[in-house]
Image (cartoon, rainbow, N blue to C red):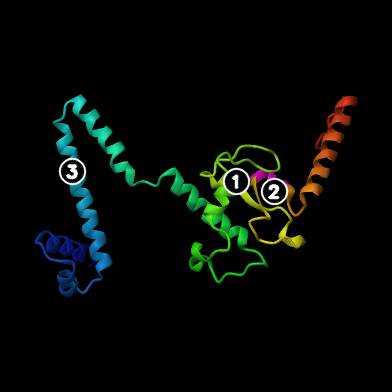
Amino acid sequence: MNEERNRRIKELHDEGKSYNEIKKLLNVSKGTISYHCSELSRTNHRKKCSTWKKGLTPLQKKISRFIENNIYNGRKKSKKTKIERALYLKIYNFLSTKNYKKSNKRKFLMAESPIQVKEVLEKFGNNPACYLTGAPIDLSEPSTYSLDHIIPASRGGLSTLDNMGLTTQKANQAKGDMTPQEFLDLCKAVVANANKIAAVGFEPTLD
């Protein structure tokens, strides 16, 4: 049944029927019509391009690829857009604490957020780095960093720009709900113990 319907959609579209006319004739939604017509258009476009490229010389093919990469790929998201999108989600998660209540993710509007992407970018500058380790951070790679509550939310820290720190994922996981000073003291203790172990030539084992 669906195959017959899809075939009729394509036939009517080829005959020049509009989406509204096809909708009335077949009693289907415009979304369904658009899906199958777009699929047909993409297939036909690929066939035409493939046939056209077969007659090109190697130099013409290189020129064609150059044009595609520099013009059509401009539709893809720029690095700046990726960073803004990543920070939008990071800010959403940063604000998802008992100090800031939201209905749900889909209704979260950046325009209404108390912290804006522009403010975050201005705070961390052109060369963002982890405030705990000093490691450089690429803001276009959201899986590698976090927006940390410097004073943990569980310890009364607010979800504000002033209380926001940029960290690597590993550093943020290690810090947990400690304050920066508590984390620093722990790191010093670990290093001191490691030096003590190295001095006596003893290596801890899992046994």
Labelled pair 2, 1 in contact (Cβ < 8 Å): no
Main secondary structure type of the part rendered in magenta: helix
Point out the stretch of residues depicted in magenta.
169-174
What is the number of the mark on residue 159? none
Which residue is pictured at 83% across the width and 29% down the height?
203
Q: Position of residue 34 (x, y in %)?
A: 24, 62
Residue 64 higher or lower than 91, as above or below: above
The residue labelled by disc 2 is: 173
**Among the two numbered marks 3 and 1 on one chain, the one whose residue lies closer to the N terminus:** 3
Which residue is pictured at 45% across the width and 43% down the height?
79
The residue labelled by disc 3 is: 47
Residue nearer the viewer, 95 or 114 = 114
Compute the Cα span from label 3 to label 1: 48 Å
Residue nearer the viewer, 206 or 198 = 198
Q: Give the amino acid type for the residue marked by disc 3 in the picture.
A: Lys
**Secondary structure type for disc 1:** helix
Q: Quadrant of the N terminus?
A: bottom left
Q: Give the amino acid type for the residue marked by disc 2 in the picture.
A: Gln
Number of residue marks: 3
Q: Give the amino acid type for the residue marked by disc 1 in the picture.
A: Phe
Q: Residues within 10 Å of mark 2 (few under 14, many from 20)?
A: few
Quarter-of-image position of residue 104: bottom right
Quarter-of-image position of residue 94: bottom right
Which residue is pictured at 67% across the width and 55% down the height?
162
The residue labelled by disc 1 is: 124
